Image (tube, rainbow, N blue to C red):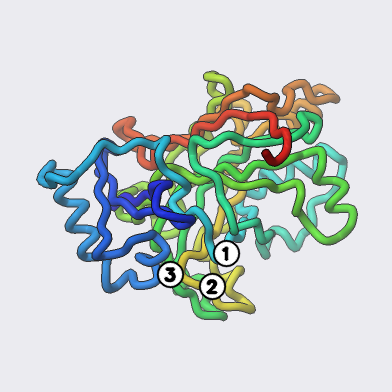
């Protein structure tokens, strides 16, 4: 099943079910007016939503309308929790190697995770707003999952049962602001602006054999200004799967239905072949191999596209397609 949120209908938008081919959609106000409402009562409304999905796929729903990715927000326009992990340790290793720092051994057994801003996400085709190109604007292509209610202390063996939806993310980073924030010893804030998620979120069964219960085994394809930047396989070199990340987040607190957990930047150990899911990683490799980075960060007007295709070449989540725009302050 594929779900999206139209921008109309208030801050939490209007939930729609979307056909598998991303061509048509329909609202289900009796089942759930918003995606958060559906997650709050998933067991009660899932069957009705799935029946609507079946009718859409067989073109048997008279009230279906064309699906337009430009008309949707992120599936959850805001969420109770956005916890982003760092599941691909090759990415972390490169960061430290580029600055001649050792990789802490604790990272190999215990995931890194930060709590991102979840009060306001941006839509999959909305602009990436920044006031200054000098901030070091970078995209970060990730996989993210959405949970139901997760009890505190849930172990990895049970955590996978709490995964309700899967989606893509562009977790934008302002790279030149990060060092100053980390030096204060209190983590990211200004360096992590609003995240965008894919046009649709899908139930894990939509991924078929590409989903193993905790990892998506398909390439995550990234383009910058129409040129392919990378297509690493999200199922390769993932050191911590999603059940492990969920258990880490729920170790000392419960997670409410609608919590989002991210994988961190997808990264493979052969970037010279498959490329990268962020500019910083390419710059790290250039620094290690050539002594200095060459690839610039994003500039105003640059475009980023993030998408995942199934084995038949069909878009699963729709594309995150954003342009970097100069923010000149509130109107």
Graded by Cα atoms within 10 Å as few (under 14), some (14 to 19) or many (20 or more), the crowding at tag 1 reads: many
Circle 3 SS class: loop
Quadrant location of residue 227? top right
Residue that mark 3 sits on: 148
Q: Which residue is mark 2?
A: 255
For label 2, the SS is loop
How far apart marks 1 and 2 lie (CA) works out to 8 Å
Residue drawn at x 75%, y 63% is: 106
Picture disc at residue 81: 1
**In this rendering, which labeled residue sits more in front, label 3 or label 1?**
1
Helix, strand or loop for disc 1: loop
Query: Which of these two is toward me, 281 or 124?
Result: 124
Q: Earlier in the sequence, mark 1 or mark 2?
A: 1
Give the percent coordinates (x, y) of residue 262: 56, 54
Mark 3 vs 1, N-terminal side: 1
The reply to whether discs 1 and 2 touch (Cβ–Cβ < 8 Å) is yes
Q: Is residue 171 visible?
A: yes
Sequence-first tag of 3 and 2 = 3
Residue at 26% over, 36% down: 66
Relative to residue 131, is residue 101 drawn left or right?
Answer: right
Say which of 130 and 312 sits in front. 130
């Amino acid at each position: 099943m594929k779900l999206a949120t139209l921008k109309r209908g208030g801050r939490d938008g209007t939930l729609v079910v979307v056909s598998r081919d991303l061509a048509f959609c329909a609202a289900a106000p009796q089942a759930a007016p918003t995606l958060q409402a559906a997650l709050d009562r998933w067991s009660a409304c899932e069957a009705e939503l799935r029946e609507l999905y079946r009718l859409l796929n067989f073109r048997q729903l008279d009230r279906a309308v064309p699906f337009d990715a430009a008309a949707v927000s992120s599936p959850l326009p805001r969420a109770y929790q956005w916890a982003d992990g760092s599941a691909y340790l090759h990415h972390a290793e490169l960061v430290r190697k580029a600055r001649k720092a050792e990789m802490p051994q604790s990272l190999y057994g215990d995931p890194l995770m930060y709590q991102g801003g979840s009060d306001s996400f941006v839509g999959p085709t909305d602009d990436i707003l920044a006031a200054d190109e000098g901030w070091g604007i970078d995209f970060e292509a990730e996989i993210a999952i959405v949970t139901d209610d997760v009890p505190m202390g849930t172990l990895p063996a049970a955590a996978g049962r709490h995964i309700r939806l899967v989606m893509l993310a562009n977790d934008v980073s302002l790279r030149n602001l990060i060092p100053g924030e980390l030096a204060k010893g209190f983590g990211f804030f200004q360096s992590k602006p609003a995240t965008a998620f894919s046009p649709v979120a899908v139930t894990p069964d939509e991924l078929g054999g590409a989903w193993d219960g905790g990892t998506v085994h398909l390439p995550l394809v990234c383009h910058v200004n129409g040129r392919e930047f990378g297509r690493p396989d999200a199922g390769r070199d993932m050191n911590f799967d999603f059940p492990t990340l969920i258990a880490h987040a729920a170790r000392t607190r419960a997670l409410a239905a609608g919590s989002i957990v991210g994988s961190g930047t997808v990264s493979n150990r052969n970037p010279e072949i498959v490329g990268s899911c962020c500019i910083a990683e390419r710059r790290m490799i250039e620094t290690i191999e050539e002594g200095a980075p060459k690839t610039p960060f994003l500039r105003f007007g640059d475009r980023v596209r993030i998408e995942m295709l199934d084995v038949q070449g069909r878009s699963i989540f729709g594309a995150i397609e954003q342009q970097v725009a100069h923010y000149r302050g509130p109107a």
